[in-house]
Image (cartoon, rainbow, N blue to C red):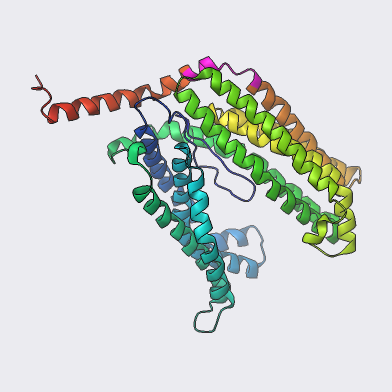
Amino acid sequence: MSLVSVSSKGCPAPWTLSFRAHGLPNQPQLVGLWTQRMVVLQIIILIPIYMVWFNAEALLLALRQDPEVARYASIYLKWASLSLPAYSFNCISRRYFQAQGLFDVPARIIFFVAPINILLSYTLVWGPDPIRLGFVGAPIATSISYNLISVASVFYGIFFVKRTAWHPISSRCLTSLGTLARLSMGGVGQVVSEWWSWELVGLAASFLGPIPLATQSVLLSTVSSTFQVPYALGVATSVRIGNLLGEKNANRAGVAASASMFICICLALLLSGVLVAFRATWAYMFNGDPAVVTLVAAMIPLVALAQFFDQCGAVLSGILRSRGKQTLGALINISAFYCIGTPVSLWLAFKQNWGLPGLWWGLTIGMAWAVIFGSYFCMLTDWENEVERVMARLAVDKGYEQERRDEEYVYAGGCDGS
């Protein structure tokens, strides 16, 4: 079983997990066991996060942020902290369902909670006087919504999902936390290395003037939205390959990896083609300024090229996660974005005076580098060896489960215990 990070632009949950080896014969309860271990690790991780959030004002002032901004940010984070445990649990419960092939369960829950979130946000921020809370209404509405998702996930898991994947709560959930932390840290590096590079480039765009900054906002909103499609495919790929490895089916795992990449290439070409086809009017969905619309139209062909590599990288990351190679993915991303992408972006934009196109050319080159090396390592995968690695990782848990069943048999009177 591999527990890894899955995240996406706009969904920063780099310490969350994805299961593999759920298909291991007679061992479905290991999904529940690793779920419990992830809950324990999440609780530990939340402690420093709470410390940062509750001291945000002092930290922001130390970074020379505007005092008014620091004060409001601190207020927002303190109220938003009510959602942190629920948000963490939701990340775990989503993987718990997905590991069993129940990809539609989180979507159903979100479909139920989303209208409630909209109503709460409007009522608490702009509603009538007795209810309206103004600024703090936004984080409170978000916190309530995340907690509703948690409650709904537990309810759904208890009453509508077979409990074959659940594991009795025991001290076993405190074991293998080091392995889990190591895999999760690799996932953190894999996710935030790319995420932070986009933030840096966005910050650089602010020095190019208001029109390039507004254009960058439109373009980032666009690629963040279209990225969700290959991101979902990457999650499905990770789970599917993991299950096949757990079933010791190396050949089908390799086929699944190849099929996912073929589908991703087709999707990337389709989405990029849509952007190019509607480039002249695309910006009107976000901004009506003629200068912004013109610059967006000029930038979209380059953005479509960058999007192609970015989306292929999402599925390659899923394949690496299924193999427990998060650290390798992190190293690829760090080299792509910090050794190549971001430096080239800044050099082209400011030294060569290319402006906004220079920023995107640098990102495109970095993402192309990541896809080339990611593809190389995925194509060289020895799937039979991956199966052996999964079995070795699960050996301890398998031994424990066998011992537990033997003890239950003895206590039930199956033998005299001598």
Q: Residue 227 location, x and y as percent? A: 68, 44
Tell me, yes or no, whether the highlighted magenta stretch contains residue 179: no
Q: Residue 370 location, x and y as percent? A: 71, 31
Query: Can residue 397 be seen in the rendering of this structure?
Result: yes
Nearer to the camera, 348 or 309: 309
Horizontal side of 357 relative to 186 (left or right) equals: right
Q: Residue 350 location, x and y as percent? A: 87, 46
Horizontal side of 42 relative to 267 (left or right) equals: left
Q: Residue 186 location, x and y as percent? A: 55, 34
Tell me which segment is drawn in magenta.
379-387
- Position of the N terminus, as image quadrant, is top left
Q: Which residue sits at x=64%, y=57%?
A: 63
Q: Which residue sits at x=73%, y=34%?
A: 266
- Position of the C terminus, as image quadrant, is top left
Based on the displayed image, in which of its 4 quarters is residue 127 positioned?
bottom right
Horizontal side of 154 relative to 376 (left or right) equals: left
Vertical placement of residue 302 versus 261, above or below: below
Vertical placement of residue 207 versus 378, above or below: below
Based on the displayed image, in which of its 4 quarters is residue 66 positioned?
bottom right
Q: Which residue sits at x=46%, y=61%?
A: 82
- Secondary structure mostly seen in magenta is helix
- The count of marks equals 0
Query: Can residue 327 be seen in the rendering of this structure?
Result: no
Q: Which residue sits at x=29%, y=26%?
A: 400
